[in-house]
Image: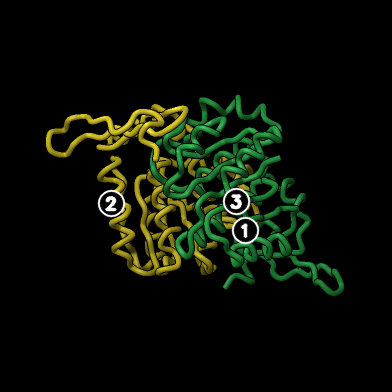
Chain colours: A green, B yellow
Amino acid sequence: MIVVLRLGHRLPRDERITTHVGLVARAFGADGIIYSGQHDSSLEKSISDIVQNWGGEFFISYEKNFIKAIKEHKEEGFTVLHLTMYGIPLPEVEKKIKESANVLVVVGAERVPKEVYKLADFNIAITNQPHSEVAALAILLDRLQEGRQLERAFDERFKGRIKIKPSERGKCRLSTNYNNRRLKREGDGIKIAD
Amino acid sequence: MIVVLRLGHRLPRDERITTHVGLVARAFGADGIIYSGQHDSSLEKSISDIVQNWGGEFFISYEKNFIKAIKEHKEEGFTVLHLTMYGIPLPEVEKKIKESANVLVVVGAERVPKEVYKLADFNIAITNQPHSEVAALAILLDRLQEGRQLERAFDERFKGRIKIKPSERGKCRLSTNYNNRRLKREGDGIKIAD
């Protein structure tokens, strides 16, 4: 099981970044996201709407006390992976973290209290340069999934109402009508691109 | 050479996302970013400040006419890689795109005109699910770099005024004073974490 814990969500500043964190978590095979900081119904709706239309079993929940959330997951046997540019480069810990059946991936905002660094089983750097928590999460999940999330076959797990048929050029989206569950082809190749 | 072309930058909506796109490009070894859409001096300053402090040779420039930018790069022999969830899954084209010495990676915003799909040498999907252009760029660059950007040795190329010493727990940042170029240790392990 892979759960993402997003710290310090602030409105309006983090609105889109936290949405991207959630969508990457889902698309790359995590089971859900817990977020902390400001409560945000609109974020929860954005993620839930994607899950409803595009499928999968992904959850989003809010937890004010993120230290409690980390401690509880540790007690349940989760390995806590904290993404920070101050940490140890991923290739040096990759083998070890893959031994864990259940991981909690902690994704910080600007200031992360030192307790998080202490509670984490691994403080992991996706490069030691400043960039993006969205990218850092993507690379970590990619390694945990061993790239399988990129394969056509992985897409089958979502069983969404909407799905994409990969095209060399253009857009092809297949969707199932809510009323009669009939498969409708909305576009074929370049034709529906505007 | 790797150049990123970010389409359709809109203010204030894309302020942080485009900054993340630029920082990922730099940290993952691209040579620079060209952006289109709204001109944004503050975005240019954010990226330039990071380059000044953290090093490297990364450029940022604005180009109103992105079709022209794509055509010019094609004429100069760049292979154009367009990231889109409608494209072909990355593992199916990975080998082919690695043959190119110079690539232009096109990162779209919400609506990408069909001409981009036609001009691209490859329309590439980093999963066929909706998530984030920041994550998509990170995964593509990771494959082009074969993961080298994550290694300690890669960090040496930046030769920045500021650099991180990787720590198992805590934050250790080394910086060179502008005036006397003396190396100053700002923290050691957990001590400077607040």
Element assignment for label 3: helix
Q: Compared with residue B132, is residue A98 higher up or lower down, i.e. above or below?
A: above
The answer to whether marks 1 and 2 sit on the same chain is yes
Mark 1 burial class by Cα count in 10 Å: few <14, some 14-19, many 20+ = some
Q: Give the image location of residue B163, x and y in percent.
A: 32, 34
Q: Which residue is at the far right?
A: A180
Q: Give the image location of residue B175, x and y in percent.
A: 26, 35
Q: Which residue is at the far left?
A: B180
Q: Amino acid at mark 3?
A: Val
Q: In this view of the protein, can residue B106 be seen by the observer?
A: yes
Q: Give the image location of residue A34, x and y in percent.
A: 62, 51
The answer to whether marks 3 and 2 sit on the same chain is no
Task: Name the residue at 61% across, 43% down.
Answer: A68
Mark 3 → mark 2, Cα distance in angstroms? 27 Å
Residue B183 as seen in the image, left or right of residue B88? left
Task: Name the residue at 57% across, 30% down.
Answer: A121
Pointer 1 and pointer 2: residues touching (CB < 8 Å)?
Answer: no
Residue marked by disc 2? B48
Residue A92 as seen in the image, left or right of residue B131? left
Residue B68 quadrant:
bottom left
Q: Check the picture and name the quadrant holding the N terminus of chain A.
A: top right
Element assignment for label 1: loop
Q: Nearer the viewer, residue B180 or A79?
A: A79
Q: Tag on residue B5? A: none
Tag 2, which chain? B
Q: Tag on residue B130? A: 1
Mark 3 burial class by Cα count in 10 Å: few <14, some 14-19, many 20+ = many
